[in-house]
Image (cartoon, grey):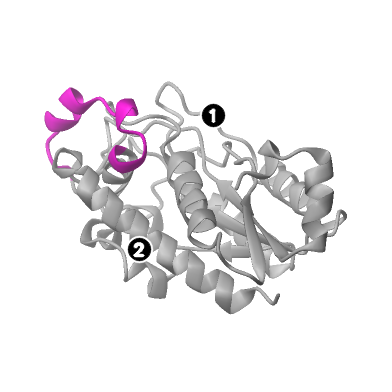
Amino acid sequence: MNFADLTSPEIDVLHRGPTPVLLLPVGAVEPHGPHAPLDTDSIISTTVCERVAWELAGESAMRVLVLPPIRYGVTRYAAAFPGAVSISEAALETLVIDVCTAVREQGFRHVVLVNSHFEPEHVAVLRRVAERGHAVLFDVTRRRVAERLTEEFRSGSAHAGRYETSVVLAARPELVDAKRMHGLPEHPVDMPAAIAAGKTDFIAMGMDEAYCGAPADATAAEGEKTLATLSAMLVDLIRDRITV
């Protein structure tokens, strides 16, 4: 399932069987409130990729493998908080293109970017990479995709809130500080509206603890439901966009 777990000879053998499809999880290292891990976005992306790889393991026409995640992204909005590690748009674009080019030169024609970090500049980079034909992008910020996700996600108030915290509770519960989580009050912030108004950091948006939404309402059950929805949409994208 994981590309990097294979040996070099095993990678070579992939070209003699079903068409390989490589999923590349993309996230960021940034604060997610006082309760959720810095790696939240990468955890979400990687978990979705792994579940889809397992789900499609029985396909006769393709073999889905998960590349090691790209954990660093453009994350300037959280710069005021400890733990935010941002890279430039140019660095992210070069890194993603170089990874896609390297595997393409080895005969792997199909790469799907699976992103769970939604800072506009970060998403813009991944869209450019996809538009230039280097990969297919699973873009949950598109309206038709977002409409299938939770009410909190659609509201734009989902950074380290109920939506993201629920997914981490389903995937890596040991990384959530449950005591802190249950003590956090609901804090609605329409992040897209704030960004459109020119606010470019969490503090300016009123997110003085690096979260919005309702993390105290998060549950592993909701996280499992969200992961199932994300996985189903990714499967649909693969079947629709990948020619085997």
**Position above or below: 186 against 194:** above
Along the line of sight, the residue nearer the viewer: 79 or 231: 231
Task: Give the labeled residue for mark 1.
Answer: 85
**Position above or below: 72 against 59:** above
**Seen from this angle, which residue lies furthest top?**
82
Dot 2 crowding, Cα within 10 Å, few <14, some 14–19, many 20+: some
Q: If you read the primary sequence from the N terminus, does the residue marked by circle 1 or circle 2 appear first? A: 1
Task: Give the labeled residue for mark 2.
Answer: 229
The answer to whether 112 appears left or right of 32 in the picture is: right
Residue 137 visible in the picture: yes
Element assignment for label 2: helix
Q: At 81% across and 53% down in the image, what residue appears?
A: 13
Question: What amino acid is found at the position of numbered circle 2 in the picture?
Answer: Thr
- How far across and how far down the image is residue 15, in percent? 81, 60
Quadrant for residue 156, please give it: bottom left
- How far across and how far down the image is residue 6, in percent? 71, 40
Q: Which residues are magenta?
A: 169-187
Q: At 48% across and 60% down in the image, what residue appears?
A: 55
